[in-house]
Amino acid sequence: MEKSTPKKILIIDDDPFIADMYVIKFKGEGFEVEAANDGKVGIEQAAKMKPDVILLDVVMPTMDGFDVLQKLRADKSLGHTKIIFLTNFGQREDIERGMQLGANGYIIKAHFTPSEVSTKVKEVLAQ
């Protein structure tokens, strides 16, 4: 049986602890994972990497997650990429804005364990 190519995940989060935790979690589950510590770098990495999923924080220096999402959605080469907000920015207006801008999901960091986030990522990939 042919071995399938691992799914690629890009984590865009300025908190190195969070980014490292999820890199370790997803690598341990067989994903190919990269991390970017700000939105601008994340957009550049996404263009090179062509990830299957991007986990995106909202509050970051230089460019917030909503701006990053809009730029990523404008890139036709990333049309297949699922983008899930992974943030502590959880007001109803923020969630609605994120979904209207084209996010495939919105996860509040404080409400989910890494295992639950992993399950959510797999659900979005299966859609």
Image (tube, helix red, strand yellow):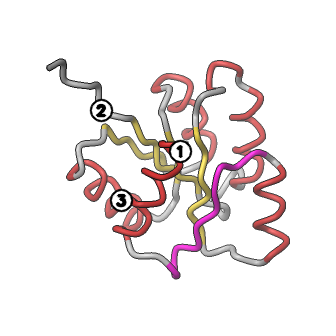
**Residue 78 found in image quarter:** top right
Q: Amino acid at mark 2?
A: Pro
Q: 30 and 65: which one is in front? A: 30
SS at mark 1 in the image: strand
- Span colored in magenta: 102-111
Image coordinates of residue 50 in percent, x first then y, are 50, 26
**Disc on res. 22:** 3
Q: Residue at x 47, y 76 (%)?
A: 112
Q: Nearer the viewer, mark 1 or mark 2?
A: 2
Image coordinates of residue 76 in percent, x first then y, are 71, 20
Q: Residue at x 25, y 48 (%)?
A: 27
For the C terminus, the image quarter is: top right
**Disc on res. 54:** 1
Q: Residues within 10 Å of mark 3 (few under 14, many from 20)?
A: many
Residue closest to the far bottom: 111
Q: Is residue 3 left or right of residue 80?
A: left
Q: 11 and 124: which one is in front? A: 124
Q: Is residue 39 left or right of residue 114?
A: right
Q: Is residue 92 above or below residue 64?
A: below
Spatial separation of the CA atoms under disc 3 and disc 1? 12 Å
Whether residues under marks 1 and 2 lie with C-beta atoms below 8 angstroms apart, the answer is no
Spatial separation of the CA atoms under disc 2 and disc 3? 16 Å
- Please tell me which of labels 1 and 2 falls first in the chain: 2
Q: Which residue is mark 2?
A: 6
- Please tell me which of labels 2 and 3 falls first in the chain: 2
SS at mark 3 in the image: helix
**Residue 85 found in image quarter:** bottom right
Image coordinates of residue 6 in percent, x first then y, are 30, 32
Image coordinates of residue 17 in percent, x first then y, are 37, 67
